[in-house]
Image (cartoon, rainbow, N blue to C red):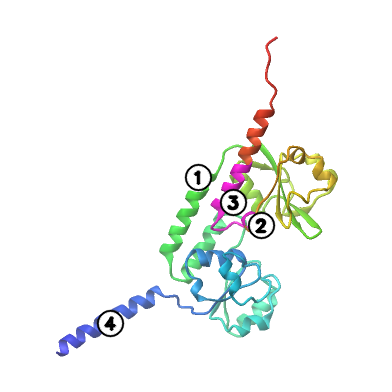
């Protein structure tokens, strides 16, 4: 009888140990930055989230969690109020003094890689998968992303593209070292503002001179809101090649990069087909 009890206890201990190894060591997690939150959901670890920031709008379920404000302008009291075991913060989160204060009172903070590159996305997945002790899920997610990129990438840069981020009355164009620049490159389009770094203001004269084949709007932009003279003078406007793409898909590099590339690939192919149809037929002398 004692032997059976011993075997039962050993078995129970093994089960409990196995469960502990599979469970996250953190039960109350705050995620700061939409790029971080999206990976947490993609890894199936959202059950540990107790708060996010207002940039965490995908998936929709993330918006139902308590919000601590904007991850670049964090409120100290709001973060402390949620009493987190750990905060996973985009490298762009701040201000720094708020993060430093949280660390000084014993709140664990992990700074998560958040650059507009595929390598950064891979690093981000590795970091978050390690924190939640789910390396296998992390590897599967990375494999899926690589397959998505491979199946949606296009060679060549025959289509001259310009990405405009429109918010209220402000319009910024995407240069190099931005998510749109990488997405255009992978989808086989040429970012005609690549000589500029980051997001920059652009004049009507510059818009017309750049002569993009296609203009892609993000944010609050839409094809019916393109009355700027500079836009109207471009081949993109004249050929009705102005498209709107969801900001979440164009302005960050995340687990849905395959979806972003699929949309851009179709836009590119539409322009190429249009251009081929407009080529004059060669006639013999």
Of the numbered discs 1 and 2, the one sitting upstream in the chain is 1
Of the numbered discs 1 and 4, the one sitting upstream in the chain is 4
Q: Residues within 10 Å of mark 3 (few under 14, many from 20)?
A: many
From the image, give the main secondary structure of the stretch colored magenta. helix
At a point 61% along the width and 41% down the height, the residue shown is: 188
| Residue that extends furthest to the top in the rendered view of this protein | 285
Q: Residues within 10 Å of mark 4 (few under 14, many from 20)?
A: few
On the image, the x and y values in percent for residue 212 come to 74, 40
Label 2 belongs to which residue? Answer: 247
| Residue that extends furthest to the front in the rendered view of this protein | 224
Give the camera-side residue of 205 and 225.
225
Label 3 belongs to which residue? Answer: 260
Say what secondary structure mark 1 lies in. helix
Say what secondary structure mark 2 lies in. helix
Label 4 belongs to which residue? Answer: 12
Distance between the alpha carbons at the discs numbered 4 and 3: 47 Å
| Residue that extends furthest to the left in the rendered view of this protein | 1
Distance between the alpha carbons at the discs numbered 3 and 1: 12 Å
Q: Is residue 257 magenta?
A: yes
Say what secondary structure mark 4 lies in. helix
Of the numbered discs 4 and 3, the one sitting upstream in the chain is 4
Say what secondary structure mark 3 lies in. helix
On the image, the x and y values in percent for residue 259 come to 56, 52
Label 1 belongs to which residue? Answer: 151
User: Quarter-wise, where is residue 276 in the image?
Assistant: top right
Of the numbered discs 3 and 1, the one sitting upstream in the chain is 1
Give the camera-side residue of 242 and 3.
242
- Cβ–Cβ below 8 Å for labels 3 and 1? no
Of the numbered discs 3 and 2, the one sitting upstream in the chain is 2
Of the numbered discs 4 and 2, the one sitting upstream in the chain is 4
Left or right for 19, reference 67 = left
Q: Which region shows up in magenta?
A: 249-267
């Amino acid at each position: 009888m004692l032997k059976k009890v011993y075997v039962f206890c050993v078995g129970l201990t093994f089960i409990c140990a196995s469960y502990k190894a599979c469970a996250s060591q953190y039960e109350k997690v705050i995620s700061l930055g939409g790029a971080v939150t999206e990976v947490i959901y993609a890894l199936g670890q959202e059950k540990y989230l107790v708060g996010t920031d207002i940039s965490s709008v995908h998936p929709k379920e993330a918006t139902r969690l308590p919000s601590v404000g904007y991850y670049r302008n964090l409120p100290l009291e709001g973060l402390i109020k949620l009493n987190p075991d750990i905060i996973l913060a985009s490298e762009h989160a701040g201000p720094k003094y708020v993060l430093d204060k949280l660390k000084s009172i014993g709140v664990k903070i992990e700074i998560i890689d958040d650059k507009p590159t595929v390598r950064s996305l891979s690093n981000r997945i590795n970091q978050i998968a390690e924190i939640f002790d789910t390396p296998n899920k992390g590897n599967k997610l990375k494999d899926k992303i690589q397959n998505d990129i491979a199946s949606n990438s296009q060679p060549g840069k025959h289509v001259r593209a310009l990405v405009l981020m429109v918010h209220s009355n402000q319009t910024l164009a995407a240069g190099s070292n931005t998510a749109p620049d990488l997405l255009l490159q992978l989808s086989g389009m040429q970012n005609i503002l690549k000589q500029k770094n980051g997001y920059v203001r652009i004049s009507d004269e510059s818009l017309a001179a750049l002569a993009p084949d296609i203009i892609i709007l993000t944010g609050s932009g839409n094809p019916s809101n393109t009355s700027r003279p500079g836009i109207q003078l471009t081949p993109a406007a004249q050929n009705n090649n102005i498209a709107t793409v969801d900001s979440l898909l164009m302005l960050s590099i995340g687990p849905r990069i395959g979806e972003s590339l699929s949309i851009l690939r179709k836009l590119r192919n539409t322009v190429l087909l249009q251009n081929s149809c407009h080529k004059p037929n060669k006639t013999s002398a």
